[in-house]
Amino acid sequence: MNATPEPRPTEWPHKDALLPPVIRELPPGRHEFHKERLMAQIHADTERTNPSARQNPARPRAPWWRRPVLVLPLAACALAGALVTGSALTGDDEGTGLATGPLLTTQVAAATTHGTGGLLQRASVAAEQAPLPAPRPGQYIYIESVTANTYVRTRGDDSEVVSEKLHRRQVWESPDGHKGWLVEPGNPKGGITLDTKVDRDAAYDALVTLPKDPDALLRRIYAMSEGQGNGPDQAAFSTIGGLISESYPPAGLEAALYQAAAKIPGVVALDDAVDAAGRHGVAIARLDEKAGLREEWIFDRKSLTFLGERTVLVRQPRHANAEDRLIKPGTILFTSAVTKRTLVEGMKEAPSQRS
């Protein structure tokens, strides 16, 4: 029996009544990505009540559409919920070191199911022909990107939608995912540790264990993402997105992920999308009907190599609250462009110019 759910219509039924927006959980591959944001916000709250604790400048907590779940201890998750209605979404830029820039917006492009399979097949072939080398013992994975979030900033009685200034993000990670380092504006000078005892689904050693057969891989993806997000298809699409973005896929896996994604109902193609580095390309996307958000994977138009991803508000949920209604369709809620993905010999070591 095929474990993949039966296909559903790929059209976007605007006439259908929308359910209240559901807070979107992240796929396993992105949990650790945002853990440091929450922990930094905890340090920020401590600093506000204890001025002597200024050795840990803070990041703003990720907005609700990028909210971390599952990885944190229960106490931290409880605090996360408290922060949502408190200082976490106030965008206290003075205390974070993260500058705001122009509001990130785009024209909502029309999407089509026509040619989606062919585009993903071409991306699969491109990934198959240019596999990443496997890390040797002692090496670290280095990923550099340009990224930014958009959120609602509240000061007193006034709320406004602001976007972070596009900025560089540098991540080092051991193949087992247990050791890591992050350098990004808003964190302490020199960076912060990403060390964890938690086994990460997007760590290289975990990715090696995934099947390369697209059907078997898709069944595993649905199992990994069960109970997350707004429906199994959207959760599976988001999980694959997490496994191809800030990660280092072993040979054969990236190609298989694209072939698996082609089998998810509701996947569409866009003729033009722009990543955080300003590079135009084609995109594979899927609309989260309940949240009104479209997740887009952006590929180089000629080589079909993966460039980055972004999340765009296509339409507001009918039951959005007053604060969420400040965010208008066409707003880019999250954007990222991978600019370097390579291996280095040690933690915090910069990649050579030849890599």
Image (tube, rainbow, N blue to C red):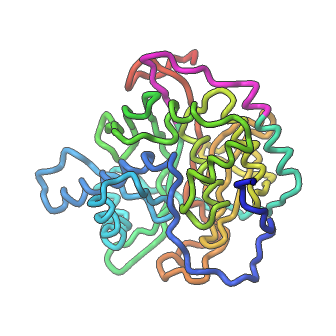
The answer to whether residue 281 is left or right of residue 253 is: right
Front position in the image: 98 or 124: 124
Is 14 rendered above or below residue 279?
below
Determine the residue positioned at 82% across, 40% down: 121
Q: Give the range drawn in magenta.
A: 125-144
Is 133 covered by the magenta stretch?
Answer: yes
Front position in the image: 324 or 285: 285
Which residue ends up furthest to the right in the rendered image? 114
Determine the residue positioned at 59% across, 67% down: 230
Residue 314 drawn at (x, y percent): 67, 68
Q: Picture quarter containing residue 93? A: bottom left
Front position in the image: 97 or 128: 128
Determine the residue positioned at 80% across, 61% down: 111
Residue 247 drawn at (x, y percent): 54, 37
Residue 151 drawn at (x, y percent): 47, 64
Q: Picture quarter containing residue 331? A: bottom right
Is 16 rendered above or below residue 238?
below
Is 203 rendered above or below residue 17?
above
The answer to whether residue 271 is left or right of residue 347 is: right
Q: Picture quarter containing residue 319? A: bottom right
Is 340 covered by the magenta stretch?
Answer: no
Which residue ends up furthest to the front in the rendered image? 1
Is 341 rendered above or below residue 80?
above
Determine the residue positioned at 53% across, 58% down: 102
**Quarter of the image where the C terminus is located:** top right
Residue 213 drawn at (x, y percent): 73, 37
The answer to whether residue 76 is left or right of residue 318 is: left
